[in-house]
Amino acid sequence: MKTLGLIGFPLSHSFSKKYFSEKFEQENIAGWQYELFPLEMIEKLPDLLAENPSIVGLNVTIPYKEAVIPYMDEVDESAAFGAVNTIKIEAGKLRGFNTDVYGFEESLKPLLKAHHKAALILGTGGAAKAVASVLEHLGIMYAYVSRTPRAGQFSYKNIDKKMLEKHALIVNTTPLGMYPKVDFCPDLPYEYLTDKHLLYDLVYNPDVTTFLKNGKKQGARIKNGLEMLYLQAERAWSIWNGDF
């Protein structure tokens, strides 16, 4: 039996086990199982692998997409920007990939309009790096927004009507609003959003976060992260099967 799994902490929000378990059943894929491996510290990864020699692949979620990189023997060019969300294990060697880039780009492109020339990325973690990589590839200018901004980044306090008029695409890469804390959302002046705005939330549980609800009230188009999840999961499956 080959084991796949998800590492991160906490993992109560994740659909990954359900997704892959149903995939194996529906497609009659035998000899594979998918498990959740909540790790309170990334330093426990070597012990996890030693105790579970059947693991041949892992997905990586919050908060370890960047912290896991030092444990890789090799990092694929898809993760060269500094975030790994998929690990393939062969002959004891760990190779890191990023499938979030593929999932985000393919789910975003059909929604883009000519006026989506600049974006705000809410958050600065591994998922934010994947989003930035896609926006660069698509020729969309972007700026990071953080509760603790570094040089060149904006604070939520900086976001005003003028800035929202300039940035018609807003991508939430933070866990704010994720189940079970569904009443939380990024601190934005939502009253300045219009029907020209596109709000994309990487969170997919619940289906419509408070961030997206606030945008929809102002006429903005909204998109959650569920399609991105499916796309990145299928790309990960292809990697584990040797297609990449």
Image (spheres, helix red, strand yellow):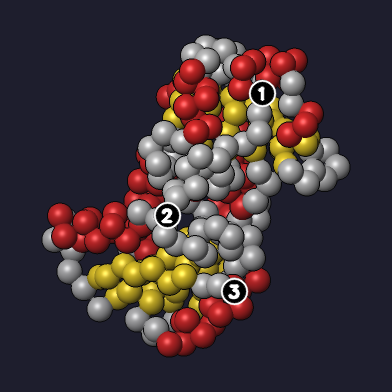
Measured in 3D between alpha carbons, the distance from the residue under mark 2 to the one under mark 1, in whole angstroms, is 27 Å
**Residue at image location 82% in from the left, 45% down from the top:** 150
Mark 3 surroundings within 10 Å by alpha-carbon count, few (fewer than 14), some (14 through 19), many (20 or more)? few
**Residue at image location 56% in from the left, 80% down from the top:** 44
Secondary element under disc 2, as helix, strand or loop, is loop
Q: Is residue 18 left or right of residue 111?
A: left
Secondary element under disc 1, as helix, strand or loop, is loop
Secondary element under disc 3, as helix, strand or loop, is loop
Measured in 3D between alpha carbons, the distance from the residue under mark 2 to the one under mark 3, in whole angstroms, is 18 Å
**Residue at image location 31% in from the left, 67% down from the top:** 34
Query: Quick check: 57 above or below 226?
Result: below
Q: Earlier in the sequence, mark 2 or mark 3?
A: 2
Q: Is residue 219 left or right of residue 123?
A: left
Residue beneath disc 3: 41
Q: Total of numbered circles in the picture?
A: 3
Query: Quick check: 193 above or below 222?
Result: above
Quarter of the figure with the C terminus: bottom left
- Residue 83, given in percent of the width and then of the height, sits at 61, 56
- Residue 154, given in percent of the width and then of the height, sits at 78, 35
- Residue 212, given in percent of the width and then of the height, sits at 49, 29
Q: Are marks 2 and 3 in contact (CB under 8 Å)?
A: no
Residue beneath disc 2: 13
Instruction: Tell me the amino acid under the disc marked 1.
Output: Pro
Q: Which mark is residue 189?
A: 1
Q: Is residue 11 left or right of residue 28?
A: right
Q: Earlier in the sequence, mark 1 or mark 3?
A: 3
